[in-house]
Amino acid sequence: MAEHRHTNHLANETSPYLLQHSHNPVDWYPWGEEALRRARGEDKPILLSIGYSACHWCHVMERESFENEAIASIMNEHFINIKVDREERPDLDAIYMAAVQMMTGSGGWPMTVFLTPDQIPFYGATYFPPEDRRGIPGFPRVLVSVARAYREKKEQIRNDATAIVAALRNSAQAEMHEDGLTTSILDSAADRLMAAYDDLEGGFGSAPKFPPSMSLTFLLRSYLRTGNGEFRAVVEHTLDKMACGGIYDQLGGGFHRYSVDSRWLVPHFEKMLYDNALLSRVYLDAYLLTKKPLYRRIAEETLDYVLREMTSPEGGFYSTQDADSEGHEGKYFLWSPVEVSAVLGQEDGDLFCRYFDITGDGNFEGRSILNIPRPAALVARLNGVSEQRLLEVARRGRALLLQERERRVRPGRDDKILTAWNGLMLRSFAEAARGLGRHEYRLAAVAAAECVLGRARREGRLLRSYKDGKARIAAYLEDYAFVIDGLVSLYEATFDPRWLEEAIGLANVAVELFTDEQGTGFYYTSREDEPLIHRPKELYDGAVPSGSSVLVCAFLRLWKLTNEEQWASRARTVLEPMAVPMELHPQAFSNFLCALDFYLAPVREIAIIGNPQDAATQLLLNELSGRYLPNSVVACGLDGRPLLLSGKTPVGGKPAVYICRDSVCEAPVTDPAALGRLLDEPRPHDH
């Protein structure tokens, strides 16, 4: 195929995904007034193509169709072609994905949607092959048919499209729960979640399996609330299975996107920042609860992977790592016994291969994805070595093979810094810094906060995306929500009042920009954004938690730290209409359920009166930080900021801890052991 060196209208974009398409023969435009005006002026339908940099099938469709001169000429003749990076424009992705799901019953990326010149969708699907294949029409045939339909049936298309928009606008309505917000919602949701549990392989449902981090977090909270050991067992079984599967990068740490099978073996190999933020946090929580060394190791290896491969010089975190390298999916991550023995020697190589399931036949296209199908004790016994010897070979082998792997051609990386995903990762590093006492994680969290607030903010407003010195696109609800939530955790990891003040300042901006004054809850787009065909409210917790659910969590934490009732009432107005959906569809609303659990819990308001840098205060903080206390907030200092610290004093010249509930405090303690006893007292959930 000929090399295309001319550029289209994407050449000045910063998104790596859009730049990948800037030399296509397709006359691509970014979303914006220039393309929309041309569509209206020429009365041409819009071909909207939405994808992202780490998406395997997006690359396939580009190679097959968008680089094909003949297909490109059909697109250019009949359509105004717009390319969108879904990570930069999640508002467009949400609107048009909902439309495609209504039209076809399913969705995914690459997403191909045909719009009228006034942006209303009338036909759409996901991947199209370049010619007819297995019952899927080829892309050229689709293009010609859609163009003809638009010319000949314009009136009918406009009527049908108007009905789609009406359905989109009605889809965000929710019904009130007749009993209000009670723990019965949590009980019922946990039972429904358990009914979907795969008791053989862990996780929920069947293949493909996505890591269910938020559902596991909700079940950990449910275990704490009810004492039901089955909830804890489900979480541990799932975490064990994922940690031993191919979905986890056994050499470099970090999780791939999802598993195509039910046993976590064969992943889609891309690594997303948000998955690793959410999974490192649930492994950390599980470690704090169970003290199981495996969970600490997985949390730390995942965060260390992010520091090693996904952190920018400015301190922000990159978005994604591709599945493909050298044109082959997963090539970077696959091994053969010969390659292993060349690095480790024959004897250690054989042992390593048996433990990590590396065989001559392989488990993926003739080579092997590392995974651990059998416990170390069994593998050691079958191979006549001690378990200690096997684990030493595994530890040394992982380090040496990782070194060897670094010499391979790396998968591509999308190095834009997305504000929302940085907020998620900021919280994970802050909580790991506190929970594990890791100073370098605290430094990483502070650097990320400095990067987002310093580089992705203009005149008090956050921006969505930062790359190459440029920040662009007004931020969405999730950007504000995730950053506010991350900053609250950063305050609790550093006790620097600046971070709490920044969180409160952004929370006030979020209220101003996103509140639905006529209804309940928050819009996904700001009132200052360009008008689209529909102003969406994003409520489902999908691959990332919804902006609404995270903002509710953040508001509830601010309420307890500042004693300002407005944050509680704003949270309540979002939670109340969500009661029925939460109860009936727990997998789609897991983070909302976590927020409700916090709202209904006897939250511990922990005030430590002392200088956070002093050794005596540190001993009290250490007693606190190694525990799983999801329904608590912590403040520390001597100056009465935030309000939780106000009016409380050291005791006998020593730093003191006050544990309060609804601003009613127990007698202060100054001794770490006494604090430990107080924290270990069972605290039943109030109804």
Image (cartoon, rainbow, N blue to C red):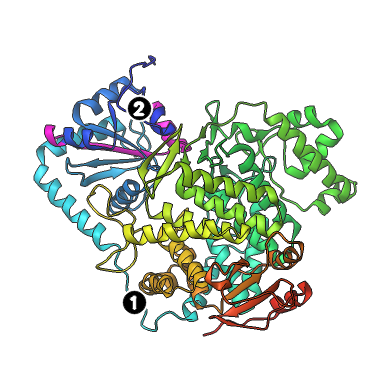
- Give the mark nearer the N terminus: 2 vs 1: 2
Which picture quadrant has residue 522?
Answer: bottom left
Question: At 9% across and 46% down in the image, what residue appears?
Answer: 155
Q: Element at badge 1?
A: loop
The residue tagged 1 is: 176
Question: At 62% across and 57% down in the image, what residue appears?
Answer: 494
Which picture quadrant has residue 137?
Answer: top left
The residue tagged 2 is: 12
Which picture quadrant has residue 147?
Answer: top left
The amino acid at mark 2 is Asn
Asked if the residue under mark 1 is in contact with the one under mark 2, i.e. CB atoms within 8 Å, the reply is: no
Task: Answer above or below: position of 382 versus 629.
Answer: above
In the rendered image, residue 117, in percent from the top left (x then y), is placed at 17, 40
Q: Is residue 145 located in the magenta-colored stretch of the structure? A: no
Mark pair 2, 1: CA separation = 48 Å
Front residue (pair 14, 3): 14
The amino acid at mark 1 is Met
In the drawing, what numbered circle is on residue 252? none
Task: Answer above or below: position of 160 versus 581.
Answer: above
Give the left or right position of residue 306, taking residue 520 as reference: right
Range of residues picked out in magenta: 40-64
